[in-house]
Amino acid sequence: QVQLVESGGDLVQAGGSLRLSCAASRSTSSFNAMGWYRQAPGKQRELVATISRGNTRDYADSAKGRFTIFRDNAKNTMYLQMNSLKPEDTAVYYCYANIIPRAGTIYDYWGQGTQVTVSS
C-alpha cells in the first residue's frame, strides 16, 4: 500500500511563501504522475499542479507564475513551492499520485491533506 504524507502547511500573510512537501512510501520515480490538489471550504477539490514521470509540469491558471512543482526522487518527496500567496489560496492541499501497472488500470493514491491559510 502506498502512503503519501504532506507537510508544510501553515498560516502566512498575503504575499508570503510556503513550501509543501509530500513524502511517499515508495520511489517517486515509480509513479506515472504526481500532483497537488486543493479544496477550500464549500468548494470542490481542484487541481493545482501536476508533474509526470518525465517531469512535464502542468499548472492551473491560478497557480501559473506563482507556484512550482518539483520532486526529489532521491528523497522520495514531491514539493510545491508557493510564492506571492493570496487569501484565495487558502485551502487544504492534497498530494496525489498514480500508478499505471498495465493498460486500462490506474491506482490512485491521496495524502491526508495539509492546511494552508493566507491572511489578508
Image: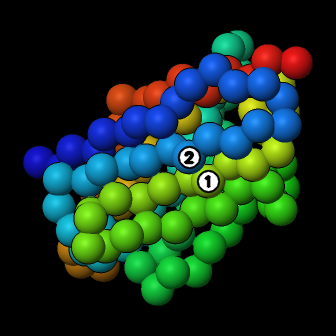
* Pick the front one: 19 or 55: 19
Q: Is residue 114 left or right of residue 97?
A: right
* Pick the front one: 29 or 110: 29
* Pick the front one: 81 or 97: 81
Q: Can residue 1 be seen in this view?
A: yes
Q: Earlier in the sequence, mark 1 or mark 2?
A: 2
Kindly check if marks 1 and 2 are in contact, taking CB atoms under 8 A apart as contact: yes
> Which residue is under mark 2?
19
Identify the element where label 2 is drawn.
strand
Type of amino acid at the residue the image marks with label 1: Gln
Going 58% across and 62% down the picture, which residue do you hit?
69
Estimate the x, y position of residue 78 in percent, counting from the top left: 42, 59
Q: Is residue 99 visible?
A: no
Most extreme residue toward the top is 42
Type of amino acid at the residue the image marks with label 2: Arg
- Snapshot colouring: rainbow
Going 37% across and 70% down the picture, which residue do you hit?
72
Estimate the x, y position of residue 56 in percent, counting from the top left: 58, 80
Estimate the x, y position of residue 44 in percent, counting from the top left: 66, 28
User: Badge 2: few (under 14), some or many (20 or more) residues near its Cα, within 10 Å?
Assistant: some
- The correct choice, above or below, for 112 with respect to 94 in the image is above
Estimate the x, y position of residue 24 in percent, counting from the top left: 26, 53
Q: Is residue 10 left or right of residue 71?
A: right
- The correct choice, above or below, for 35 with respect to 42 in the image is below
> Which residue is under mark 1?
81
Q: Is residue 32 left or right of residue 74?
A: right
Going 52% across and 30% down the picture, which residue do you hit?
9
User: Badge 1: few (under 14), some or many (20 or more) residues near its Cα, within 10 Å?
Assistant: some
